Amino acid sequence: MLPKNNMDFAVVEEKEQPSKTFKMNAEKNVVRGTCDDVEALKQAIFLMLNIERYSCPLVSFNFGAQLSDLIGMPVSYCIPQAEYRIRDTLMQDDRIDKVYDFSFDTSKKGILLAKFKVDSIFGSIEVEKEVSI
């Protein structure tokens, strides 16, 4: 005998979470105060791109960028891989709409400098990331 269902389902409502977080000062190695909106997103982008995926037990394996295995690879391989991996990493954040307009500088030996734009719910942000190759 199967139970009867009258098809009344609970209505689930999605609620946007605030982006308020602790404010980091990477130059002084201090965390003091809080930040919100654009500043919180810039900080999140910094953390996502500077934590190597699978290397930090304090964060989920879904967090961070996987860029360290590009070391020693040819530039022709590193450029499209860095673009793909950076875009893949940042698009995990639902505040980010689009990652685009990549340009790469290989003038420093062993360093790939990626410059790109991030469109978010707070507006457009220009970002730079150095990748060791």
Image (tube, rainbow, N blue to C red):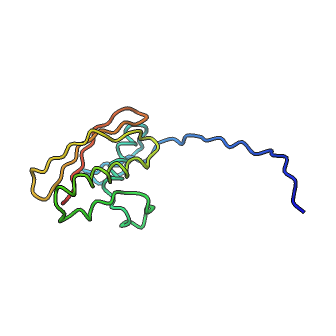
Q: Residue at x 85, y 46 (%)?
A: 6
- Please determine whether, in this image, residue 44 is positioned above or below residue 125: below
Q: Quadrant of the C terminus?
A: bottom left
Q: Residue at x 22, y 56 (%)?
A: 78
- 49 vs 120: above or below: below
Instruction: Name the outermost residue toward the top.
Output: 123
Q: Position of residue 115 (x, y in %)?
A: 23, 43
Indicate the quadrant where residue 10 lies.
Answer: top right
Quarter assignment of residue 16: top right
7 or 60, nearer to the observer: 7
Instruction: Pick out the residue farthest to the right.
Output: 1
Measured along the vertical axis of the image, is residue 68 above or below residue 122?
A: below
Question: In x, y percent, where is residue 98?
Answer: 38, 39
Residue visible at 41% across and 57% down in the picture: 63
Residue 28: x %, y % from top left? 26, 51
- Where residue 37 appears, as percent x and y from the top left, is 42, 37
Left or right: where does residue 98 sit relative to residue 101? right
Between 114 and 76, the one nearer to me in the picture: 76
